[in-house]
């Protein structure tokens, strides 16, 4: 989902550019999720910048919310920590703005839930996300094929809508979702919550091939949920265009903070290992 200038030439979003750059380097893209404001605003800013510095191609900035139904224990705990220090939609927008001020190139995708967006208003949210320097939005519980309001608001601002595609998504639904998507398609490797064990990869690989066919290969397909180690990332990269790591990165931060250490070096080393595993 990219806008076009008056002469009709397409504009390439930062997200599309990141995947294209990875392809040109003969590797798969690394998408990294971090919960905004965990453990606090400034540390979160440093963590996001460190992740980009260490090789994350796309950053997913998790918007803290009190009822993250699709997220597992690690991200739920991160959201509670973030909310306790004032995290939320407003702080996430400020955090995106701060990251963008220091890094003009890394793609940032807001990752959140429908309620905070609906309360703010879709048009207002989309405009504020754009002003903050975001490139796309992933909303877990706002199906674009059932309610186009959010997709239309994002399109109006030139932001990519990054959809989730589940193992249970029907062919008809995959086609409908892909038709309004931008940036990349996020294939959820399992039914359940984040942080679960990586499932049978043969099934996931077959499903990714099907998603590509149904979407006519218009967008790259990244696979997430259950990828916890460089070995996991390497295995998934064998059939996906990108890998998404979230809960494992959040746990790296939690362990460092729990031990009284600055989590930035630990996360930077973890992301570097993931990036090396992808070629």
Image (tube, helix red, strand yellow):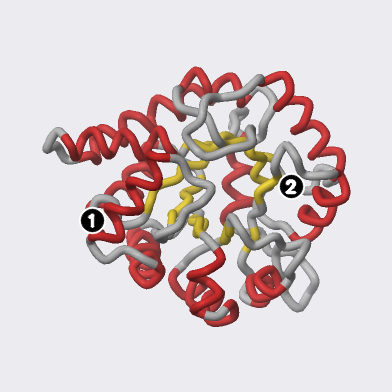
- Asked whether residue 272 appears in the rendered view, the answer is yes
Quick check: 97 above or below 224? Answer: below
Q: Nearer the viewer, residue 183 or 236?
A: 236
Which residue position holds label 2?
A: 219
Give the residue drawn at x 46%, y 22%: 230
Which quadrant is home to the N terminus? bottom right
Is residue 153 rendered to the left or right of residue 246? right
Q: Position of residue 74 (x, y in %)?
A: 38, 39
Q: Position of residue 152 (x, y in %)?
A: 70, 74
Q: Measured from the top left, where is residue 115 in percent x and y?
A: 52, 69
- Pick the front one: 237 or 74: 74
C-alpha span from label 2 to label 1: 34 Å
Mark 2 is surrounded, within 10 Å at the Cα level, by few (under 14), some (14 to 19) or many (20 or more) other residues, namely: many
Residue under the image location 69 percent in, 57 percent down: 182
Q: Nearer the viewer, residue 171 or 135?
A: 171
The residue drawn where x is 76% and y is 64% is 146
């Amino acid at each position: 989902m990219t806008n076009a200038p008056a002469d009709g030439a397409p504009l390439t979003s930062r997200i599309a550019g990141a995947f294209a750059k990875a392809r040109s380097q003969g590797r798969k893209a690394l998408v990294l999720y971090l919960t905004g404001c965990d453990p606090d605003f400034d540390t979160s800013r440093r963590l996001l910048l460190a992740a980009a510095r260490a090789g994350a191609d796309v950053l997913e900035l998790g918007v803290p919310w009190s009822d993250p139904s699709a997220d597992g224990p690690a991200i739920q705990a991160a959201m509670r920590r973030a909310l306790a220090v004032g995290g939320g939609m407003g702080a996430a927008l400020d955090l995106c703005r701060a990251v963008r001020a220091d890094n003009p190139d890394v793609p940032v995708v807001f990752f959140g839930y429908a309620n905070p967006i609906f309360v703010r208003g879709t048009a207002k949210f989309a405009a504020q996300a754009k002003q903050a320097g975001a490139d796309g939005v992933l909303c877990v519980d706002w199906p674009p094929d059932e309610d186009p309001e959010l997709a239309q608001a994002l399109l109006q601002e030139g932001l990519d809508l990054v959809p989730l595609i589940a193992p249970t998504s029907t062919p008809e639904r995959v086609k409908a979702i892909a038709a309004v998507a931008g940036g990349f398609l996020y294939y959820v490797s399992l039914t359940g919550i984040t942080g679960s064990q990586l499932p049978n990869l043969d099934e996931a690989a077959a499903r990714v091939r099907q998603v590509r066919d149904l979407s006519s290969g218009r967008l790259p397909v990244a696979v997430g949920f259950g990828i916890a180690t460089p070995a996991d990332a390497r295995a998934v990269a064998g059939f996906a265009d990108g890998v998404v790591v979230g809960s494992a990165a959040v746990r790296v931060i939690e362990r460092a903070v729990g031990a009284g250490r600055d989590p930035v070096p630990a996360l930077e080393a973890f992301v570097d290992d993931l990036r090396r595993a992808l070629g």
